[in-house]
């Protein structure tokens, strides 16, 4: 059991998820403190998205327990849903609506007051450089623009926990920097707890205060970047990862493989 | 409440932006009105049934609502495919509100289609006997629409692929339509078939529309109202439950 002191906002014990025979998440235990930036680092298929989906009420766990701000998603999903904002790995915008409408509808679903909604929408769309394109239909946006809009939308209702599932996948380096700077600023100024997944070592190391490395459904190690390096006696996270899993994870910059991967998601059959 | 409103509004917006959908879904009812109306009209009259268009028009209005409403469920599958369903499911909105919002959205679109078909039927020669009863007709159109949108939506919560959904819906819609009294009177049919009509909610909707637009309803408007409303409520409850079980 992870320490359950008052500063713990997410606490997960022995969490497991199997999909007809495949164990996607295998008895993982970890906790996230309120106000910290926590990263899940792991290769494709490690179980990162599956874990996030269980924390955010989208999937029902096969076993184990979850506490999100003191609530169990299985018993009080509604209370849990109030606590977080999320940027999914896969697209989740309404492409037949404009950027502004997507923001507006989100704000209404999350019961954000009109004045605040309008003001925050303008602020966020300006930061992600979409304010001038706010009245365009999302289906006419590029992949990176859609991503930026999703990030803006996830922040609109001032969540106390922000889930980011590979948020910067497919973004150019400048935009990635811009977004991370903003998220860190937000983390400081509003105390938002950030839980993100990535397979970019440098991103995890630069942004996260604590990291859990997950591979084949299991957490192989967790701690601060420095702890991970000293415990594996490695000079870099990359070496630590290779040492722990016997494999390399992947390069730092988005590769053509990433882009392929994003595209593949579009063609995946619904429901799978 | 606001969540219901915005889910409803979203569907209206999407519908109003899709001219193809508006026009495309009018083809079938128009074909039925013209082909059956003019084709069977003389035979119906000769057999002593009176003016067939008068009999047929309420049935075709009900048909267009039935089709549009049940197929509105497919929007859940579109949302699943394009990912927007996740956005709705993680929102702090009760699953009952999601079910009501979606149902009202689809139902409104279906009623609009029904009204357009009503106007088309006027051009073809339909004469409602009492125009002051139109608001009442609208109420029943709404009930039919809500009941069948809820049904389509609930089915879409369970059947996850598009082809499967379309097969099931066609399988359900055809008998529902043909055994509703929309095309011919049910009174002269064998007992067994009449029993099916008795458990077919659309039969009550057709009966009510015909009663209001042309002449007195056989089953009585109160019965029609009660059956349609209870069916709608029951399916909405089921749909809300299915939304609460949904995983993506
Ligand atoms: N709905 C599902 N049905 C069946 N198997 C699934 C489903 N969702 C995920 N899986 C399987 O679970 C495992 C973990 O998947 P998950 O999406 O959690 O990985 P991930 O760490 O997010 O990987 P990536 O970096 O590619 O996003 C994979 O083997 C995947 O095939
Ligand atoms: Mg993933």
Image (cartoon, rainbow, N blue to C red):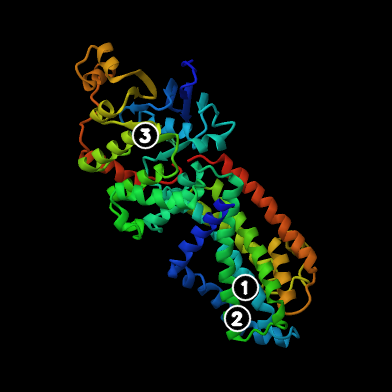
Instruction: Answer whether labels 1 and 2 touch (C-beta < 8 Å).
Output: yes
The numbered disc on residue B158 is none
Depicted A230 relative to depicted B206: above or below: above
Instruction: Answer whether labels 2 and 3 touch (C-beta < 8 Å).
Output: no
Q: Distance between the Cα atoms at labels 3 and 1?
A: 58 Å
Which residue is disc 2 drawn over? B121
- Kindly tell me whether residue B56 is visible in this rendering: yes
Q: Mark 3 belongs to which subunit?
A: A
Q: Quadrant of residue A50?
A: top left
Depicted B21 relative to depicted A242: above or below: below
- Circle 1: is it few (<14), some (14-19), or many (20+) Cα within 10 Å? many
Tell me the residue at 80%/68% (across/down). B219
Which residue is disc 3 drawn over? A189
Q: CB at mark 2 closer than 8 A to ligand 1? A: no
Q: Mark 2 belongs to which subunit?
A: B
The foreground one among A92 and A37 is: A37
Mark 1 falls on what kind of element? helix
Please tell me which of labels 1 and 2 falls first in the chain. Answer: 1
Depicted B96 relative to depicted A135: above or below: above
Residue A146: x percent and y percent?
32, 49
**Of labels 3 and 1, the one closer to you:** 3
Mark 2 falls on what kind of element? helix
Q: Distance between the Cα atoms at labels 2 and 3?
A: 63 Å
Which residue is disc 1 drawn over? B61
- Circle 2: is it few (<14), some (14-19), or many (20+) Cα within 10 Å? many
Tell me the residue at 70%/55% (across/down). B231
């Amino acid at each position: 059991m992870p320490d359950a002191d008052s500063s713990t906002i997410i606490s997960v014990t022995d969490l497991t998820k199997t999909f007809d025979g495949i164990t996607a998440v295998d008895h993982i235990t970890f906790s996230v403190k309120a106000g910290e930036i926590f990263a899940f680092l792991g290769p494709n298929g490690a179980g990162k998205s599956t874990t996030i989906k269980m924390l955010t009420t989208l999937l029902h766990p096969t076993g184990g327990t979850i506490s999100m701000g003191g609530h169990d998603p299985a018993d009080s999903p509604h209370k849990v849903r109030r606590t977080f904002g999320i940027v999914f790995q896969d697209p989740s915008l309404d492409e037949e609506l404009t950027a502004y409408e997507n923001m507006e509808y989100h704000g209404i679903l999350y019961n954000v007051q009109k004045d605040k909604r309008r003001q925050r929408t303008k602020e966020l769309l300006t930061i992600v450089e979409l304010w001038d394109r706010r009245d365009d239909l999302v289906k006419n946006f590029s992949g990176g623009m859609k991503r930026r809009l999703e990030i803006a939308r996830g922040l609109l209702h001032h969540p106390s926990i922000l889930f980011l599932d590979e948020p910067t996948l497919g973004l150019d380096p400048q935009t990635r920097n811009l977004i991370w700077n903003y998220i860190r600023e937000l983390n400081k100024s509003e105390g938002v707890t950030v839980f993100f997944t990535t397979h970019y070592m440098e991103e995890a190391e630069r942004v996260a205060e604590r990291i859990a490395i997950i591979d084949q459904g299991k957490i192989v190690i967790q701690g601060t970047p420095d702890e991970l390096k000293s415990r594996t006696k490695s000079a870099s996270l990359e070496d630590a990862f290779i040492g722990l899993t016997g494999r390399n994870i992947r390069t730092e910059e988005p590769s053509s493989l990433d882009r392929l991967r994003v595209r593949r998601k579009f063609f995946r059959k619904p429901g799978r | 409440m606001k969540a219901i409103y915005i889910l409803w509004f979203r569907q209206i917006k999407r519908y109003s932006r899709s001219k193809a959908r508006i026009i495309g879904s009018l083809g079938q009812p128009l074909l039925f009105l013209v082909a059956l109306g003019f084709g069977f009209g003389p035979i119906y009259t000769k057999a002593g049934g009176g003016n067939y268009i008068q009999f047929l028009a309420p049935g075709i209005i009900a048909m267009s609502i039935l089709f549009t409403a049940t197929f509105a469920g497919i929007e859940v599958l579109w949302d699943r495919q394009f990912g927007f369903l996740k956005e709705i499911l993680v929102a702090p909105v009760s699953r009952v509100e999601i079910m009501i919002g979606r149902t009202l959205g689809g139902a409104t679109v279906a009623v609009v289609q029904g009204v357009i078909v009503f106007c088309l039927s006027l051009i073809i020669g339909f004469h409602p006997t009492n125009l002051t009863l139109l608001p009442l007709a609208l109420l029943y159109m709404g009930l039919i629409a809500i009941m069948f949108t809820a049904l389509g939506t609930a089915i879409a919560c369970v059947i996850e692929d598009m082809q499967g959904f379309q097969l099931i819906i066609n399988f359900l819609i055809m008998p529902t339509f043909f055994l509703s009294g929309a095309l011919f009177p049910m009174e002269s049919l064998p007992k067994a078939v009449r029993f099916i009509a008795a458990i077919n909610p659309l039969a009550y909707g057709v009966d009510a529309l015909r009663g209001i637009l042309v002449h007195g309803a056989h089953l009585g408007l109160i019965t029609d109202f009660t059956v349609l409303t209870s069916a709608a409520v029951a399916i909405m409850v089921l749909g809300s439950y299915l939304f609460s079980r949904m995983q993506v």
